Amino acid sequence: MHENANIAFLKNESLKILEHVLNVQPRQSKGSAGVSNDTLVLEQVKLLSAQVPELIDTEAYHKEITRTNAQGLLHCFSTVLMQEVYKYNTLLVQINQTLSDL
């Protein structure tokens, strides 16, 4: 299949799936004593926001982690740790932004 045709096919399939999902969703909440879906979502966001940990302070590393060798290089494990902390903090920022958007 040509790449453009494949893109059009996948786009149409995605739209069909989204249409079906929206059609089967309830229009009003059931069994929630009159609580709207928006209220339920806000409650979940508040609950999840309280569980998101704080960012890791990159300035608070132990001195041994940021010590360089004679050539001025960090230990390989320190480099990996710093990269993982950066990715973790980026993920936490994205999670907080998504919860804020909700």
Image (spheres, rainbow, N blue to C red):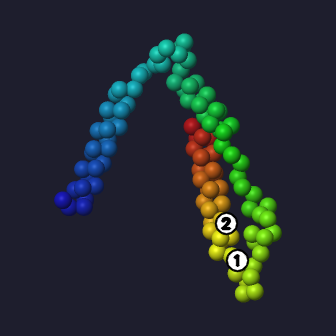
In this rendering, the count of numbered labels is: 2
Q: Could you tell me the amino acid type at mark 1? A: Leu
Proximity of marks 1 and 2: CB atoms separated by less than 8 Å: yes
Q: Earlier in the sequence, mark 1 or mark 2?
A: 1
Seen from this angle, which residue lies furthest top? 33
Closer to the camera in the image, 54 or 97: 54
* Element assignment for label 2: helix
Q: Residue at x 49, y 14 (%)?
A: 31
Q: Which residue is mark 1?
A: 74
Measured along the vertical axis of the image, is residue 26 above or below residue 12?
A: above
Measured in 3D between alpha carbons, the distance from the residue under mark 1 to the one under mark 2, in whole angstroms, is 10 Å
Q: At 32% from the left edge and 41% from the top edge, which residue is drawn?
A: 15
In percent of width and height, residue 57 lies at 75, 57
- Mark 2: which amino acid? Met
Residue found 60% across the figure and 40% down from its top: 99
Q: Residue at the bottom extreme?
A: 71
* Mark 2, residue position: 82
Is 62 situated left or right of 34 in this image? right
Q: Nearer the viewer, residue 30 or 54?
A: 54
Instruction: Say if 92 sits above or below 30 in the image.
Output: below
The picture places residue 62, in percent across and down from the top left corner, at 79, 65
